[in-house]
Image: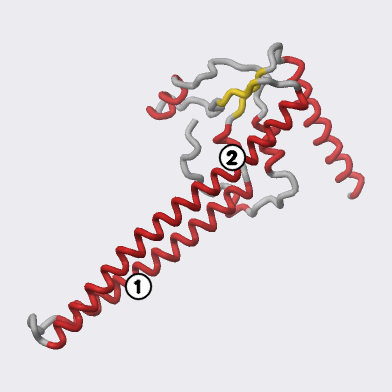
Amino acid sequence: MKASIVAAMAACMVCGGLLVSTVSAQSQSPVVVLDVSKVFKEHIRFKQDLQLMTKDAEAFQAYIQQQEIRVKALLEEQQGSRPGDPVYNRTDEEMTRIRSEVQVQSQLKKKELMMREAKVYFQYYNELQAEVGKFCDAQKISLVIRWNSEPIDQDDRVSVQQGVNNSIVYQRNLDITPLMIEKVNMGVPQPGPDNRNAAIPARPSR
């Protein structure tokens, strides 16, 4: 068993080395391409941070639903009373307070989540840039062009538009995306099947 693990690790190292040498040898100019969006889709730590934000948003949504239930109960209690009655005045004041509090808290939470999302993207994009820089310095590469490696879906108008507007028309053995995915996930445990295909927001734009 141990021998098979060692053999598998050796095979991975050989494959990685072949890919690096292929990119270096077959590119006649010091240029490579990188699908940044694909790296983010496969970036384990990045997706984990986004999942934490999603759970936070879901918890806040549950809080809002609780407040809606409170307002509904107050409306039912208010039935049969008239403006100026103690019951009406008390329930009306409480509903106004709840609605105002929910509105303020919703605005604050939205701002908080947007700031957190921006910081997450900034952090991991900077890390990716650093990894790309180290690779390019080692391989004497002067330019990395961003591209979209997703195949065009002829039945999807957006996909067709993205394909037509792709700045790269053709490339061969210049894609360093698999290498960068390996780099950013190095040493990170693989997620379970429930989290492996977690949805990712549409950032960063290509």
Indicate the amino acid at tag 1. Gln
Residue 189 at x, y percent in the picture: 71, 52
* Circle 1 crowding by C-alpha within 10 Å: few under 14, some 14–19, many from 20: few
- Which of the two labelled residues, at mark 2 and mark 1, occupies the earlier sequence position? 1
Q: Is residue 30 above or below residue 67?
A: above
Q: Is 14 left or right of 143, judged from the image as shown?
A: right
Q: Farthest right residue?
A: 3
Residue 10 at x, y percent in the picture: 86, 37
Q: Residue at x 54, y 55 (%)?
A: 51
Q: Residue at x 64, y 31 (%)?
A: 177
Task: Identify the secondary structure beneath mark 1.
Answer: helix
Q: Is residue 190 above or below residue 62?
A: above
Distance, label 2 to label 1, CA atoms, is 37 Å
Near-viewer residue (111 or 1):
111
Q: Quadrant of residue 94?
A: bottom left
Residue 66, numbered label? 1
Q: Quadrant of residue 67?
A: bottom left
* Circle 2 crowding by C-alpha within 10 Å: few under 14, some 14–19, many from 20: some
Q: Nearer the viewer, mark 2 or mark 1?
A: 2
Q: Farthest top residue?
A: 28
Indicate the amino acid at tag 2. Tyr
Q: Is residue 47 above or below residue 156?
A: below
Q: Is 29 left or right of 104, judged from the image as shown?
A: right
Task: Identify the secondary structure beneath mark 2.
Answer: helix
Residue 183 at x, y percent in the picture: 71, 39
Q: Is residue 105 above or below residue 90?
A: above
Q: Which residue is mark 2?
A: 125
Q: Residue at x 49, y 47 (%)?
A: 118
